[in-house]
Image (cartoon, helix red, strand yellow):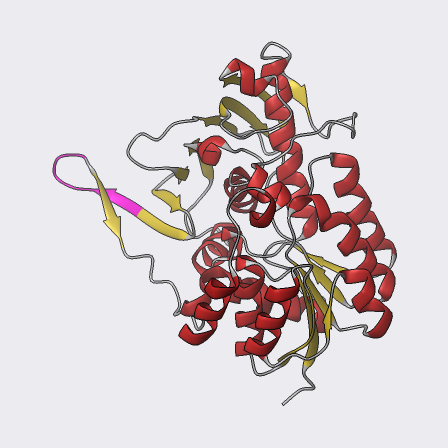
């Protein structure tokens, strides 16, 4: 058994506890410290996972402990400070979550500091890390299904393009092995479009990709939401972390659904978070490619910002990468400020009851 990776959990709300549960499950990781600003919740979560090194914030934690891995699961407003603190402290790997920031400059700073210091910057709990999506991407790269002919997004973002919307954007880039190079979009309602936030924003768009594809984007569902990619003989449909495949036609000319025969998933309790964390550990140990990186989160944010401003400026084609890194798009207030500050707090009783369930 290799030496256990020492892990610090920074931010122990609902999602932070989910991360802690995953790291507590793995035999080769050990939670050695927790940072959480809520005093009562910090105590309960520490008891739940048997951690006694408890701190108010990341800066306080890193004065005493430099773990191998730092999982930053904070509201978006506070991610940058904690990621930079982890990189400057000398951790081997730091993970964030979605959306990485509200401003491209802040996302750039995190990516650049981690790169300069040789710190692996991981993307966190995103559907792109799903074993079904990862296996599909590998098969596409190996030519299993032939040349990609088209792609389209349905119900993109579900009215928050920088938060939930970054999920589909990360999967689109992975499965097409391409970058979005130009965005033209139409969005509303107008009052939301003119605000700083994407909360309640619906966007229709056309993405031009670096491999020549043009990807139509719909703000609304047409019976399902997600990503469709088609090749010469296969339609691949991604519904969140799940993948459906259709090959051939029946007697009426309708596509026939087939079993993709994916490998078994060893961590079903934690869905794609388990495979995401394992890819981080492998990257730290072997330099392998991560399922989702901080760079991937930055790319998703940039596409979302381009889509918002294209519509705001009158459906103007916007080239990527964006020259103006000060452009900003704030996510839903729950994602930006956290539950305690946005009217959806996690009580100590809830944290304690979750502890009893586990």
Residue 212 horizontal side relative to residue 156, left or right: right
Which contiguous range is marked in magenta?
Answer: 246-253
Residue 119 seen from this side: no
Residue 344 seen from this side: yes
Q: Residue 249: within the magenta?
A: yes
At which x and y percent is residue 99? 62, 43
Residue 225 horizontal side relative to residue 196, left or right: left
Q: Residue at x 76, y 55 (%)?
A: 83
Residue 61 horizontal side relative to residue 43, left or right: right
At which x and y percent is residue 94? 72, 61
Above or below — where is 297 with respect to 11? above
Above or below — where is 301 with respect to 273? above
Above or below — where is 24 with respect to 268? below
Q: Residue at x 78, y 25 (%)?
A: 324
Q: Residue at x 51, y 59 (%)?
A: 347
For this orientation, the residue located farthest to the left is: 251
Q: Quadrant of the N terminus?
A: bottom right
């Amino acid at each position: 058994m290799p030496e256990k990776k020492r892990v610090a959990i920074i931010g122990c709300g609902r999602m932070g506890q989910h991360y802690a549960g995953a790291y507590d499950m793995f035999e080769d990781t050990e939670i050695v410290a927790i940072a959480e600003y809520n005093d009562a919740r910090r105590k309960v979560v520490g008891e739940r996972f048997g951690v006694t090194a408890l701190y108010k914030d990341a800066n306080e934690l890193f004065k005493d402990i430099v773990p191998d891995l730092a999982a930053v699961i904070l509201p978006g407003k506070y991610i940058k400070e904690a990621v930079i603190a982890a990189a400057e402290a000398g951790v081997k790997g730091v993970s964030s979550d979605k959306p990485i920031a509200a401003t491209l400059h802040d996302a750039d700073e995190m990516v650049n500091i981690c790169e300069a210091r040789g710190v692996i910057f991981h993307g966190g709990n995103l559907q792109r890390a799903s074993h079904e999506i990862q296996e599909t991407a590998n098969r596409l790269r190996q030519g299993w299904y032939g040349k990609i002919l088209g792609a389209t997004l349905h119900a993109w973002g579900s009215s928050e393009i920088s938060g939930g919307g970054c999920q589909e954007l990360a999967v689109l880039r992975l499965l097409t092995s391409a970058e979005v190079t130009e965005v033209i979009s139409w969005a509303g309602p107008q009052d939301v479009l003119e605000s700083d936030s994407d909360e309640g924003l619906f966007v229709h768009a056309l993405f031009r990709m670096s491999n020549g594809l043009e990807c139509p984007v719909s703000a609304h569902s047409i019976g399902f939401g997600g990503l469709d990619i088609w090749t010469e003989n296969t339609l691949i449909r991604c519904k969140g972390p799940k993948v459906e495949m259709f090959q051939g036609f029946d007697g009426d000319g309708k596509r026939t659904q087939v079993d993709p025969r994916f490998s078994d998933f060893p961590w079903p309790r934690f869905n794609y978070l388990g495979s995401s964390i394992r890819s981080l550990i492998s990257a730290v140990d072997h330099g392998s490619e991560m399922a989702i990186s901080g760079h991937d989160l930055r790319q998703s944010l940039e596409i979302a910002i381009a889509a918002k401003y294209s519509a705001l400026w009158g459906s103007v084609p916007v080239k990527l990468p964006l020259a103006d890194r000060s452009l900003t798009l704030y996510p839903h207030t729950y994602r930006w400020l956290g539950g305690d500050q946005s009217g959806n707090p996690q009580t100590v009783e809830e944290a304690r009851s979750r502890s009893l369930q586990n």
